[in-house]
């Protein structure tokens, strides 16, 4: 796990402000929360700031803190806790977050990191020559069943091989990242078994075979007239439940 600190002073801009569109969005987002709970908007506002500038600057953290009337340290804690927030400039076309936790590590995450080192830069968070790509190792992203995987922006790319990751990196570098379908990169639907479902494949037959699936109008009316069962009702035949008693 990498140490998460703010970027050096040399790269920090002096000020931050939302552009007009984001300012309107931020006000609407803050209004979603009840009075006195506006601080709950801290994560969406930080994420919007990152989407606007490409990373979370110190000025953005202070801006969000002032906006939500929070101490700077509280917003800093949020920004440094979640690896979804980038604390220094990252690749303009892709920042690749390689999961390095145990299931992904056992399934080849180290080879994925070697691809990143080879294609982007030896060191995490260092930009490639064109400034378009960067990478880092992150902790579990919750897709362990499809390990190994990477996150690029808000999408997960799973069931990766080194060759497939190379293709994905090439696509993002060429500005064609949107052409890559997120999710499993093999023949599986979400986290279902590779090749299709392996269980519960038998035809499911109805248990109550005596019921006519297509009753006539008379039969349906007769069925509807049957009173509901008493199974879920409390027993009220005990002496202490006699309604004549004033108190049970
Ligand atoms: S260990 Fe990689 S997604 Fe959970």
Image (cartoon, rainbow, N blue to C red):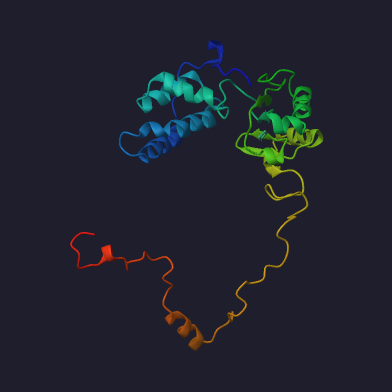
Q: Is residue 219 visible?
A: yes
Ligand number 1: quarter of image: top right
In the rendered image, which quarter is residue 104 located in? top right
Q: Residue furthest bottom?
A: 218
Q: Residue furthest right?
A: 163
Residues 196 and 96: in front is 196
Q: Residue placed at 44% from the left, 68% from the top?
A: 231
Q: Is residue 27 left or right of residue 245?
A: right
In the rendered image, which quarter is residue 98 located in? top right
Q: Is residue 56 visible?
A: no
Above or below — where is 49 with respect to 201? above
Percent x, y of residue 114: 78, 24
Residues 20 and 82: in front is 82
Q: Residue furthest left?
A: 246
Percent x, y of residue 230: 41, 70
Q: Residue placed at 42% from the left, 65% from the top?
A: 232
């Amino acid at each position: 796990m990498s140490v998460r600190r703010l970027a050096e002073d040399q790269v920090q801009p002096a000020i931050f402000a939302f552009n007009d569109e984001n300012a309107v969005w931020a006000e609407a987002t803050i209004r979603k929360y009840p009075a006195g709970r506006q601080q709950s908007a801290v994560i969406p506002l930080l994420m919007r700031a990152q989407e606007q500038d490409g990373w979370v600057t110190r000025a953005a953290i202070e801006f969000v803190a002032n906006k939500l009337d929070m101490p700077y340290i509280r917003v800093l804690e949020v920004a440094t806790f979640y690896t979804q927030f980038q604390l220094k400039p990252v690749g303009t076309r892709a920042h690749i977050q390689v999961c390095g936790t145990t299931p992904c590590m056992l399934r080849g995450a180290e080879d994925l990191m070697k691809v990143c080192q080879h294609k982007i830069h030896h060191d995490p968070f260092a930009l490639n020559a064109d400034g378009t790509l960067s990478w880092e190792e992150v902790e579990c992203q919750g897709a362990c069943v499809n390990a190994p995987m990477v996150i690029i922006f808000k999408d997960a790319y799973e069931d990766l091989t080194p060759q497939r990751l190379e293709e994905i990196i090439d696509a993002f570098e060429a500005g064609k990242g949107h052409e890559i379908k997120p999710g499993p990169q093999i023949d599986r639907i979400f986290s279902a078994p590779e090749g299709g479902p392996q269980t519960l494949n038998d035809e499911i037959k109805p248990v109550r075979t005596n019921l006519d699936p297509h009753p006539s109008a008379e039969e349906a009316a007769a069925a509807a007239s049957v009173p509901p069962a008493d199974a879920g009702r409390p027993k009220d035949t005990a002496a202490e439940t006699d309604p004549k008693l004033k108190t049970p």
